[in-house]
Amino acid sequence: MRRTLLGAGLALVLAVGACSTADPGPGAAPLTTTGTTTASRQDADQVRRTLASLRKVADLPLYEMTYVGAYDPTVGTDVAAAEPFGCSLFVAAGDPDRPLFARNFDWDANPALVLRTDPPDGYASISVVDMSYLGVDADPAGDRRLLDAPLLPFDGMNERGLAVGLAADDGARADRDPGRATVGSVRVLRLVLDRAATVDEAVAVFRRYNVDFAGGPPLHYLIADRGGASAVVEFVDGRLRVERGTGGWRALTNVPVVGVAEERRRADRRYRIVAEALEGSGGAADATAALRILRDVRQAHTRWSVTYDLRGGEIRLTTAAGGEHRYRLPVR
């Protein structure tokens, strides 16, 4: 286990530790912000309305907030990274009329935020944020560091029915192309949510940038769209590789999948449980069935489980504190 101070530049690996293969150890120390440059492009009234929209909805604690106005998705922040745990994600697209994206977020006992954004130059989206990465105190009311929340989507879905999430892949390495701009390995999720309507467009966003893993574990990504397409994006021997979904489902934990035989993938317990469940259903799962699968791979440090209905726009989120919260993002 290691702790690293992340750079303030475009690397922004703020949440990379959230989805690693490491076994959970003692609780990590709270994260502290060492310096923040806000992403906000809001006027004073938009700042007021954004902060005023914050409300606590559960004892995780879980909050909700609506970001009003524009933000700069390339602004950096400094935070201290903590110890990595693990995550599980999957796409169930066996029913072409009800494709669904699901994930467990397994991490330390921090407050979470369901965030709505609707940037003037991008797609509206709903995403989930671990608030500790903002350095926000126990009482976040009025804390201007919340204005950086759009930069930290751990998972999310946009109004076009495009969903994305991440997990650690310890063997990944991303080489740098001097002809491309560099973006952090978590920040790229915000660019995807804002700019991509399909898996192909999301992959194109990844190809447009160098993805920087500096300061934290390397990652791989799961993407799905309302048409039922899905893909895993990984970095193998320094190069971006993409494996498209087949067979109506796709699973991702913390083991590589690109170029890896299915038998080897299933050596990972969580991957195997998800794969067998989806294989048995022909790749189809509604939100209730998906949450049941997520419960089967739940760990002691699972903070939230969430499903994204890629056509219907319904989001169902359950927390470690119990209870379920539902949201709807009109998909067009």
Image (spheres, helix red, strand yellow):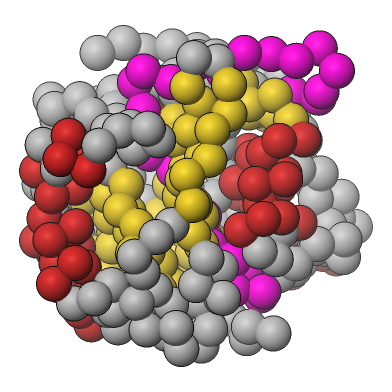
From the top left corner, tell me how far across and down residue 223 is, in percent. 51, 55
* 213 over 301 or under it: above or below: above
Observer-nearest residue: 17 or 331?
331
Q: Which residue is drawn at 83% across and 57% down?
A: 70
Q: Quadrant of the C terminus?
A: bottom right
From the top left corner, tell me how far across and down residue 199 is, in percent. 61, 58
Q: Is residue 64 left or right of residue 24?
A: right
Residue 288 falls in which quadrant of the image? bottom left
From the top left corner, tell me how far across and down residue 78 is, in percent. 60, 22
Q: Is residue 200 left or right of residue 240?
A: right
* 200 over 64 or under it: above or below: above
Q: Residue at x 13, y 72 (%)?
A: 280
Q: Residue at x 44, y 30 (%)?
A: 219
Q: Does the magenta portion include 165?
A: yes
Observer-nearest residue: 210 or 115?
210
Q: Is residue 232 left or right of residue 324?
A: right
Residue 286 seen in this snapshot: yes
* 103 over 332 or under it: above or below: above
| Magenta residues (range) | 156-182
Q: Does the magenta portion include 293?
A: no
Q: In this view, does 108 lie to the left or right of 67?
A: left
